[in-house]
Amino acid sequence: MGSGGWETARAECGVGRGNLSGSACQGSGAAPPRPSVSAPQSAPVPSDVVRGKRAALFFAAVAILLGLPLWWKTTETYRAPLPYSQISALNALQLRLMVPVTVVFTRDSIPLDDQEKLPFTVVHEREIPLKYKMKIKCRFQKAYRRALDHEEEALSSGSVHEAEAMLAELKEQAEGSLTVYVISEYSSLLPQDMMSYIGPERTAVVRGIMHREAFNIIGRRIIQIAQAMSLTEDVLAAALADHLPEDKWSSDKRRPLKSSLGYEITFSLLNPDPKSHDVHWDIEGAVQHYVWPFLNALSAAGNFSVDSQILYYAMLGVNPRFDPTSFSYYLPMHSLPHVINPVESRLGSSAASLYPVLNFLLYVPELAHSPLYIQDMDGAPVATNAFHSPRWGGIMVYNIDPKAYNASELPVRVEVDMVQVMEVFLAQLRLLFGIAQPQVPPKCLLSGPKNEGLMTWELDQLLWARSVENLATATTTLTSLAQLLGKISNIVIKDDVASEVYRAVAAVQKAAEELASGHLSSAFVASQEAVTSSERAFFDPSLLHLLYFPDDQKFAIYIPLFLPMAVPILLSLVKIFLEMHKSWRKPEKID
C-alpha cells in the first residue's frame, strides 16, 4: 500500500487531532464510535460569598435564639402568682355563725322524766334572709345540763340582780357565749307577769314549765332570748348595708360607722355670740366620767382618741324661723342637713386623720335667736333638742335660761350641765356604732346597762356584726383586685403585694372557721387582719406603675431600635432561601 492509502485509512479511523482517547479502528466498513457525554460541573463559589452567608445565618441565629428571648425576658412585666382560684371561691363562701348557749335547769323547772334525760345537746340552725352573695347561717348550739349546787344557791336568792351578781363571781364566760338559767314556773326570782329576764352580762333567766313538751316549749323561748342577745336580721343588715342592694334592709340602716382599726371623737363647743355669753364647760371631767368608761368597754372593737375645742363666732349657716306663739325660734326638720356643711369647714379635725372622725357639737345660740328649738317631722319640738347625722356625729342646741339675762349684765356666765349633755351624746354614740335598743320577746324584763353604758352581750353583738362586715369587705376587695389584674396584663404584681393577698385570703378562711367554731374574739381579730391586708394590697402604689402605658408607645420605642438591625438580616435570609430553593429545583443531567 502506498503512502496515500495509509493517510486515507488514518483519516477514516481517527477522530481528529483533538481525539486523544479514540478507540481502535474496527475496519474500513465499521461506523464511528458514539462519544460519551458527562454532567457539566458548576463553577466554584467564591469564598467571600460563603462567608457572607454564614455571617448572615449566624447573626440571624443569635438574634432569634439569644437576643429575642433575652429581650422578652428583660422587658416583660413581672407578675407574682396570685391565688385566683381561692379568691373566686370566696364569693361562694358560706358563713356559719355559731353561738354556744348553755342551758342550766334548776330543780322543779321541768318534769322529773325530762330531768333524767340531761345532759344532751340540741342544735338549732337557720339562714339569715339577706340578699347577699355570701350565705349566712345562724347556729345556736344549746347544751342542756343540770344546775350545780352553787348555781342552785344563787338562783334561790331574793332578787334576780343578787342571783346574777353571785353567778358572775363564780364563772367568767367567753365572748359570744350565752348562759340561760331555767327556774321554776312559780319562782319569785322574776315578777309574776314576766316569763324571762335579760341581764347586762351574758346571762338570762327563763321560767320553766311542767309539761310533757317542756323541752320544746322552753327551747323556743331560749331561741328568742338568744337571738335578741346575739344575732338578728337587723344587726346583720346594718353591718352589710354597704354591700346590700337599696331595699328595705339597707335604706334605713346606713347609720352605723364602718368597721375601722381606730376612731377619733371630737367634742366642740360653738359660741357664736361671745359678747353675750361667757360659756364654760367641764369637758375634761365629763369625758373622764362618762365617755372613757364607755370607750374602754368598746376597746375590743378598735382604738379611740378623744379631743375637744371651743369655736367662737361659729354660725350654723341656717337662719332660724320665729314662732310668734311661743316667742322662740326653731329649726325645721328639712333644714337640718344644711346646718352641718358650714360648721364642718370650721372643725378641721378630719383633714389630717387616718381614721373615721365623730363630731359632737354643743351649740349655744346667739342672743338674737334665743331660745332655739329643733322640730321633728310633725312640727313638734324634739325632747333632747338634738339630732345626729349618720357616720358623722351629732349636734345639740343648749338654750340658756331666760332668767339669767335679768340677773346680770352681758356677757352672761353660762355653766353647761354636762350630765344633760353627755346623756344625749352617749345615746348618739351608741346609735352611730350600731348599738340599738334590743328587740326583746314579749313578757321579757330587760335590765339596764352597766355603769359603762354598755351591756356585755351588746359588745358581742357589735363584734359579730363587725366580723361579718370585715369578711364581706375583704372578699369584695380581693375579688375586685383579682378582676382588675386579670383584665389588665401590664400591671406589675410585686412579691409584697402577692404576700398581702395570700395573707388576706388565709385570714378570711381563718375568720370563717373561727366563727363556725364559736370563737368570736379570734374571729374578729382575723377579720380585721383580712381587711387590712386586702386594702393594703389593693391600694399599693406599685399597681399603678404601668397601668397607663399604652401599646403604641412600646412600638414607638422599639421599632427605631430593632428595625435597622432586622432589615439586613431578614433580606439576607430571604436571599439565601431563594438561592437554596433554586438549586433544589434545578434538574440533574444523567448519561
Image (cartoon, rainbow, N blue to C red):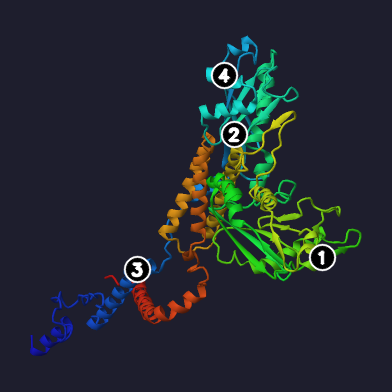
Q: Amino acid at mark 4?
A: Glu
Nearest the eye: 501 or 315 = 315
Q: Which residue is mark 4?
A: 153
Of mark 2 and mark 3, the one earlier in the sequence is 3
Q: CA distance from mark 1 to mark 4?
A: 62 Å
Q: Amino acid at mark 2?
A: Glu
Tell me if label 1 and label 3 are in contact, CB under 8 Å: no
Q: CA distance from mark 2 to mark 1?
A: 45 Å
- The quarter of the displayed image where residue 60 is located: bottom left
Tell me if label 1 and label 4 are in contact, CB under 8 Å: no
Q: Position of residue 263 (x, y in %)?
A: 57, 55
Q: From the viewer's perspective, is 13 left or right of 273?
A: left
Kindly state the secondary structure of the residue where label 4 is placed.
Answer: helix
Q: Is residue 497 above or below residue 471?
A: below
Of mark 2 and mark 1, the one earlier in the sequence is 2
- How many marks are shown on the rendered structure? 4
Q: Which of labels 4 and 3 is toward the front?
A: 4
- How many residues crowd around disc 1 within 10 Å: few (fewer than 14), some, or many (20 or more)? some
Q: Is residue 311 above or below residue 213?
A: below
Q: Which residue is mark 3?
A: 70
Q: CA distance from mark 4 to mark 3?
A: 83 Å
Evaluate whether residue 561 shows in this view: yes
- How many residues crowd around disc 4 within 10 Å: few (fewer than 14), some, or many (20 or more)? few
Q: CA distance from mark 4 to mark 2?
A: 19 Å
Kindly state the secondary structure of the residue where label 3 is placed.
Answer: helix
- The quarter of the displayed image where residue 154 is located: top right
Q: From the viewer's perspective, is 367 left or right of 221?
A: right
